Amino acid sequence: MHQLETVSGAIFKASARSLFVFPFSVNNQDEITDPISVLHDFFISSRLPGHLRLLKQWRNDAAFASEAHKNGDASSLLYHYELIIKLIEAAWLLKGKKFGQIKINSEDEIDIAKWHIKLERKNLEDYPGNLSIREIIRPASVIKKIFRIHKPEGYRKILNIWLHDALSNSFMEEGLTKTEVIIVYEQLVKLFEAMWLISQRIIARA
C-alpha cells in the first residue's frame, strides 16, 4: 500500500472518531473562552494569501485529482486541516457577535463605504478580493451565511473527506461531487477573508 494511503487512512479514522468524542477539536479552554485568539494564531501561521493558496491546492487535490500534493508532505496537510477546523469552530463561537464592524451604512452611505475600503486597502498589506462591500463593512455577517449551508460538524465531516481524497490514490465511496467541493471552498474563502479583516481591525483598535 502506498505510504500516503496508510497515513491518510489513519488520519481519517482518528478525525472521524473525534466527531463523536468531543464537539470541538480545541481542548484548550482559553481558545473556547477567547475564540479571537484562534484567529490571531491562524494568521500567525500564514498570512491570508498563503492560506488561500493552500486551500485552493487542497480543493484541486480533492475535486480535480491534482497530483501536486499527493506525493508531498502529509503532515503539512494535516496541520492545515486542523487549523481550518479550529477557525470554523472559533467562527461558530463568534456567531451573532459584531466584531470588526465599521459603523457605516453600506446601503445608504455607499460612497463613504467605498472611501473607507479604499483607505483601508492602502493600509493593509493583504485585502479581501471575494467579499461584497457590505461583507467588508460587516465581516461578521459572513459567519452567519456560511453556517446556513453547514454547521461546524458538517464542515468537519466534509473536510475529513477532502483530507482523505487529497492524500489517497483512491476516492472514498461517500466522496463529494465537484460542485459540492466548490461550494464549500467558496464558503471557506469568504470565511478566511472575513476573519482576516476582523483580526486586523481588532489589532488596529488595540
Image: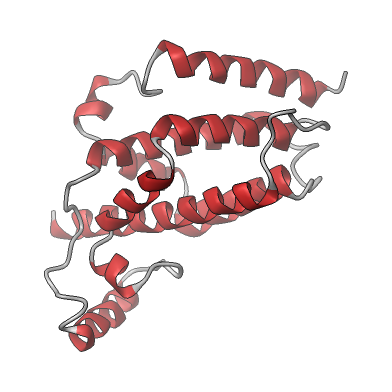
Image position, residue 79 (x, y; %): 54, 32
Query: Residue extending furthest right?
Result: 1
Q: Quadrant of residue 2?
A: top right
Between 142 and 179, the one lying in front of the other is 179
Q: Is residue 47 placed above or below 162 in the rendered structure?
A: below
State the residue at coordinates (19%, 46%).
96
Residue 46 location (% of width, % of height): 47, 48
Residue nearest the observer in this picture, 63 or 83: 63
Q: Is residue 62 visible?
A: yes
Would residue 9 be found to the left or right of residue 49 on screen?
right
Left/right of residue 175 with respect to residue 192 in the rendered view:
right
Task: Locate residue 39: give its quadrant.
Answer: top left
Place of residue 52 in the rendered image (x, y in percent of width and height, measured from the top left)? 53, 55
Q: Residue at x 40, y 52 (%)?
A: 191
- Mark yes or no: residue 79 visible: no
Residue at horizontal 69 percent and vertical 45 percent from the top? 177
Reply above or below: 166 against 25.
below
- Position of residue 3 relative to residue 55, above or below, is above
Residue drawn at 45 percent across, 43 percent down: 45
| Left or right for 19, reference 147 | right
